[in-house]
Image: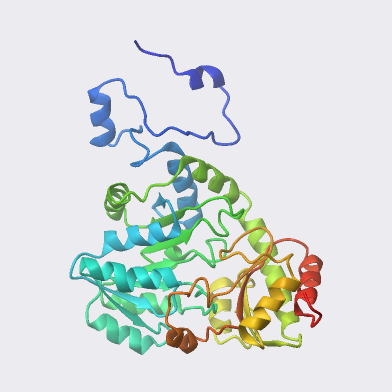
Amino acid sequence: MNKPNPLAELLGASSPMVPPLFQSSVYALPDLDALDGVLTDGQSGFIYARDAHPNARLLAQEITRIQAGAWSVICGSGMAAISALALTCVEKGGRIVASHRLYGRTVQLFGQQLAKLGVACDFVDCHDLAAVEKSLRQGAQMLFVETISNPLLRVVRLRALLEISARYQCKVAVDNTFASPALLKPLALGADLVMESLTKIMGGHSDVTLGSVSGSDLETLPKMNAVVSIWGFASNPFDCWLAQRGLETLTLRLNAACDNAMSLAQWLKRQPGVRAVHYPGLPEHPDHDVAKNLFGERFGHMLCFELEGGRAAVNGFMRRAPGIPFSPSLGHTSTTLSHPWTTSHRYVSAEEKIEQGITEGLVRLSVGCEGLAQIRAEFERGLSLSPP
């Protein structure tokens, strides 16, 4: 018995201002010809949510527009997106060249998990262009970098890396999470693939866990879709619905957070007990000129500061400033902090952490878009020497 489409009957000529939530894991089709049309002939429609669903498709279309790309794929997390990217672009016996300044779990994925599949990874200092070229000369399918590194906010010379990689016919994949497309669109500069953790500033409200991969080469899309489906990297419809809502205010939120971060970084430099402040917007940052060339007048919502006294000083700050939650993530509307030594880089060796400049006194801030006076007041409490 054929059932009428209740949604079409209900809406008539109207359309919702907010995309509806399609919380369905499976879709009904009228016959086998319709099934063939969706699976083989590229006709519109959905079958099983692990393969595709409307909310992921709508979110992907919006991210593609924002990224100035040709396509986007939505995954269940940022790490799922990086995994899908690697499994699509690199085969057994292949090789990745990656920045040695990456999120700790990305390092584990490239250095340990992909090694089980016969994929090698060479971690290099991507600020040393000669070292990058030397590594690429040995052959590689992918160069992987973070636009702004986690946690010390080093900014890569992306245009130079793209030029070098082109000489060796190596794809360039960029983790753009700390910048977001509101600051930089790597595809527009010539990158092959860009990954975003939508869990962070793009979702913006700490209520989704998602990742995206966007690209310009349409030949890569079916391969990426197959990996996402086969490996089970699929996204949840409700998370996609929430993330699309978050995108509506991305530029507003990021601009306000960037302005707060700049003011806070300048203020922190003058505070007793603060050994160092790391923020690309500061003239003394080693990559300030690079960041200004890439981003313009805003430099991101992330900053780091180092407290004298190490772990004990960080604990004291956290206890005196409960209004800045300890939250090992980033991108929330309000300011949060994290401790790279024990969170994002917990599984990186102590020697490597020290070599990168990650100390036990280092605090990573995700600066929010609340009032600057409110943030400053909480920091004054945290940096005071009175007992918590």
Q: Quadrant of the N terminus?
A: top left
Q: Quadrant of residue 96?
A: bottom left
Find the residue positioned furthest to the front.
387
Residue 6 in percent (x, y) is at 49, 18
Q: Can residue 246 be seen in this view?
A: yes
Q: Can residue 171 be seen in this view?
A: no
User: Residue at left 59%, top 36%?
Assistant: 18
- Residue nearer the viewer, 96 or 230: 230
Work out whether 12 lies above or below 267: above
- Which residue is farthest left? 93
The image position of residue 346, as x and y in percent, is 48, 74
- In x, y percent, where is residue 113? 30, 67
Residue 118, by quadrant, is: bottom left
Q: Which image quarter is the C terminus in?
A: bottom right
Q: Is residue 287 left or right of residue 158?
A: right
Q: Residue at x 78, y 63 (%)?
A: 371
Residue in the picture at 57% in, 83% down: 360
Write the residue at 52% across / 80% down.
154
